[in-house]
Amino acid sequence: MTAHALDTHAGQEPAQVEPARPVEPALQLSTAEMAEANINPSTGLATDYLNHFNEAIMMLELIPSMPACIGDLMDWNVMTYREHFLATTQKHRDAVLVAYDTADSQARIQLDEIADTMSSILSATRDALRLDLSPTVAAGLAREAAFQLKPLVARAGAVINGLKVSGDIPLAGVAQAAVDAILRGRS
């Protein structure tokens, strides 16, 4: 599997992703252009970003039956919305980035908070999987991380699609607490 972005560890700043080509200047996008680029016209956000997290969930779900997938998960990297689209050669990349820059600010903030939480869960999980874990503990950790991530991806999808999302988003510390609890059980 190919690495997709930046690997950041606690306390480190991510390196800058260089765009594959310059982003076109911000223009007003038509409804047709937004639809073609899979951008929700009410929020200005694209669900394609969630594929980045779904890929990691897929790897987590494979770890219990195929522990070698841990290596694939280690090749996967945390990416912000902007980094994800800057790193792609997707045909509608520029439109997606222009729309993000002018997206509904509340939706963008909510999406970024959810993405930060998912990234924290994945970073903590990857850090724990770098330890000398038994296959049983690694499988349990992978299952728990996938279990935590799936509702967050659904919540992010709801935000992108303009649905009102209420309730608290789990704090990043929840991910570390889950990893700690699993590791305590390995002794």
Image (cartoon, helix red, strand yellow):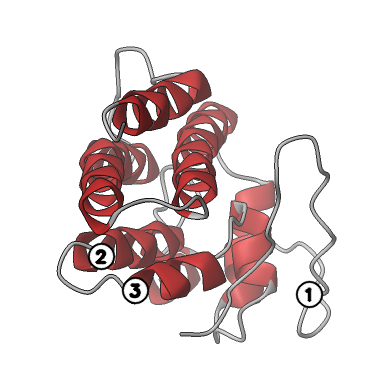
Say few, some or many: other residues with alpha carbon within 10 Å of mark 2 (under 14 / 14 to 19 / 20 or more): many
Is there CB contact under 8 Å for labels 2 and 3? yes
* Residue nearest the observer in this picture, 76 or 112: 76
Which residue is under mark 1? Answer: 24
Q: Amino acid at mark 2?
A: Ile
Q: Nearer the viewer, mark 3 or mark 1?
A: 3
Tell me which residue sits at (40%, 57%) in the image: 53
Q: Report the residue at 62% width, 52% height from top.
A: 80
Q: Which residue is mark 2?
A: 63
Kindly identify the residue that appears in the image at 66 percent across and 46 percent down: 102
Which of discs 1 and 2 lies nearer the camera? The answer is 2
Specify the amino acid type for callout 1: Glu
What secondary structure is marked by label 1? loop
Residue furthest out toward the front = 187
Closer to the chain start, of discs 3 and 1, is 1
- In whole angstroms, how far apart are the C-alphas of marks 2 and 3? 5 Å
Q: Which residue is mark 3?
A: 69
- Residue 28 appears anywhere in the view: no
Q: Earlier in the sequence, mark 2 or mark 3?
A: 2
The location of residue 153, given as percent across then percent down, is 31, 45
- How far, Cα to Cα, is label 1 from label 2? 40 Å
Picture layout, residue 139 above or below residue 171: below
Secondary structure at numbered mark 3: helix
Which numbered dot is residue 48?
A: none
Quadrant containing the C terminus in the rendered view: top left
Q: State the CA–CA distance, disc 3 to disc 1.
A: 38 Å
Bin the neighbour count of mark 3 within 10 Å (Cα to Cα): few under 14, some 14-19, many 20 and up. some
Please give left or right for residue 160 compared with residue 23 in the image: left
* 135, 3: nearer the viewer: 135
Q: Amino acid at mark 3?
A: Cys
**Residue 44 visible:** yes
